[in-house]
Amino acid sequence: MYKHILVAVGTHPDSITLEAAIRLARETGARVTALHVVDPVPPYAGAATCDFSVTLDAFEAYGHAVAERCVAALHQAGCDGDARTIMLPMCGSTMGRAIADHARAIGADLLVIGNRKPSLWSLFRENLYKEVLRHTDVPVLVATDALPAASGRALALRPRYAETAGA
């Protein structure tokens, strides 16, 4: 069914998205690529608040730690795969576009992303799901722990055409 799954992972060690991708990879024999995207200039940070060289070094080190954690989880689960960290350019791209572009570059046939719980910070963040859908023609699986399921977690496959322009 699926041959290559790209999973967008965040900074939380108990990654629901990685867990979902591993479960699908076991069922289908797919290869998994875990991708951590670093935004060096989050929208809530002003230029005066950052020493960019120190910040970039810290982001890079943390991104490598996230990638190592993902590789360890993949190997522990017995899945074929790897993990990568990419940094967005200072301007001209979004996380959603970077994920979609990377999926296209590696030939992924399924994207797995998470669903963030709404918060005050949601005003400053892009809607990752909608942004990924704008830039990909690959099916997107949204992994969430907010939906009831027997295991306490649910998966929702959202096809590209599920979103309308007015939504």
Image: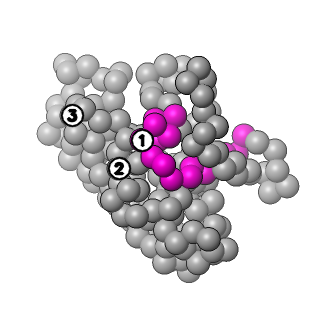
For residue 108, side relative to residue 77 (left or right)? left
Is there any visible trace of residue 69 in the rendered image? Answer: no
Quarter of the image with the C terminus is top right
Residue 153 image position (x, y, % from top left): 74, 51
Q: Total of numbered circles in the picture?
A: 3
Q: Is residue 91 above or below residue 54?
A: above
Choose the circle earlier in sequence order: 2 or 1. Answer: 2
**Is the C-beta separation of discs 2 and 1 under 8 Å?**
yes
Q: Is residue 83 above or below residue 59?
A: below
Mark 2, residue position: 101
Residue 99 image position (x, y, % from top left): 40, 48
- Report the amino acid beneath label 2: Asp
Q: Is residue 53 above or below residue 111?
A: above
- Say what secondary structure mark 3 lies in: loop
The residue carrying pointer 1 sits among few (fewer than 14), some (14 to 19) or many (20 or more) residues within 10 Å by Cα, namely some
Mark 3, residue position: 90
Is there any visible trace of residue 166 in the rendered image? Answer: yes
Q: Which residues are magenta?
A: 130-146
| Image point (30%, 52%), residue name | 86
